[in-house]
Amino acid sequence: MVTYFRDRTPYLACRATGSTDSQAMFIDQTTLTIRSGDGGNGCRSFRREKFVPRGGPDGGDGGNGGDVIFVADAALNTLVNYRFHRHIRAEHGRPGTGKKCKGRRGASTTIPVPPGTVVRDADTGETLADLTACDEQMVVAKGGRGGRGNARFATPTNRAPETAFPGESGQEKRLELELKLIADVGLVGYPNAGKSTLLSRISAAHPKIADYPFTTLQPHLGIVSYNDFDSFVVADIPGLIEGAHLGRGLGYRFLRHIERTRILLFLIDVTSLNPEHDLDILRNELHRFSPMLLKKPSLTALTKIDILASNDQERKSRSDRYHCFSSVSGEGIPELVQLLGQLVARNRPGESHG
Ligand SMILES: Nc1nc2c(ncn2[C@@H]2O[C@H](COP(=O)(O)OP(=O)(O)OP(=O)(O)O)[C@@H](O)[C@H]2O)c(=O)[nH]1
Ligand SMILES: [Mg+2]
């Protein structure tokens, strides 16, 4: 038997405070203590029946303890459930009984987490599970084995063994859960660069858009369809600023959500005085977070091309070097989607990288 861990506390807490801001509920890191069930004790018993003298040992084995299993659940996109419930355990196995009855196995506990969750042992740092595919499962703490009952120890020379073993203890582990979203394209740019507007234009996602920096406070995913049957997933994360690695702004800690993307799309406002310099700053922040990020194939595009005055020749000539688009007028968007689609397809595992 498997029990599913379900927790409604955060939602109730949210309602109690009158909060409707779903952004506050995005949690991508938490710690958890889990414990698998102990095995049931083996039984020490002898058959006692009228007219059956010396009936012999008949103590049954204890049942195994339940496991703690993590499973990737596509319906989830946050670890908020485990913010308030930090101890989760599986059931103990039942002890064996007389008449060679084996104890019942303890129910395993299944912990649903969003796909992209990495489970680490908080004490050793060892990665225990990295659940990327939907419904992928991993037993993170195995239940203790049930102890053997004395019926098992009868031998021709010892017909009445007194020995029965206690069940093995379950495992207790302190875990760190880290969610790294799974997407094909990661949007990287300064605050206000137009990342969320682009996502809302090319997918059905509805991230908050506003004319001030740090509008986006949590990552958003959107599915972009192109060429009738193809699609890719885009991740919009909070904007980055210079010195993000020193704790400025809030985009830095969200860079973990583009660690798994296949490609990066750098977005720079067309009104920027020096797009190359902006790009260098963004790339430097990425490098500080993880040099691996810069090894990903990337594309750079200038946003808001609609606001460029027709006589602004200097900016116009500068923008020739990049793909330019406008999420307002739609100019350059179909071409951008095609470019991204091709780049994603080229970088899918198993595809040629030519
Ligand atoms: N004219 C014009 N305005 C745009 C375009 N794209 C975005 N904007 C505006 O630029 C402002 C910022 O857009 P957002 O999409 O919220 O920018 P962001 O990069 O997601 O910003 P953060 O979430 O703060 O990192 C909003 O007022 C948008 O309406 C565009 O193509 N043309
Ligand atoms: Mg945004």
Image (cartoon, rainbow, N blue to C red):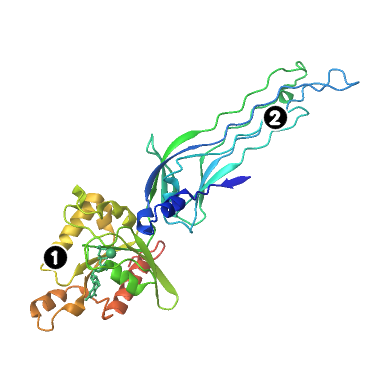
- Left or right, 3 with respect to 86, comes to right
| Residue at 34% over, 71% down | 200
Dividing the picture into quadrants, the one containing residue 144 is: top right
Q: Relative to residue 76, is residue 120 depicted above or below?
A: above
At label 1, counting other C-alpha atoms closer than 10 Å, the crowd grade (few under 14, some 14-19, many 20 or more) is: few
- Left or right, 147 with respect to 97, comes to left
Name the kind of residue labelled 2 in the image. Gly
Q: Position of residue 79 (x, y in %)?
A: 42, 50
At label 2, counting other C-alpha atoms closer than 10 Å, the crowd grade (few under 14, some 14-19, many 20 or more) is: many
Q: CA distance from mark 1 to mark 2?
A: 72 Å
Closest to the observer, 252 or 161 = 252
Dividing the picture into quadrants, the one containing residue 98 is: top right
> In this rendering, does residue 10 appear at all?
yes
Q: Position of residue 64 (x, y in %)?
A: 62, 35
Q: Position of residue 314 (x, y in %)?
A: 8, 77
Per the image, the residue denoted by label 1 is: 276
Per the image, the residue denoted by label 2 is: 96
> In this rendering, does residue 131 appear at all?
no
Dividing the picture into quadrants, the one containing residue 202 is: bottom left
Label 1 vs 2, first from the N-terminus: 2
Q: Residue furthest right?
A: 51
Q: Which mark is residue 198?
A: none
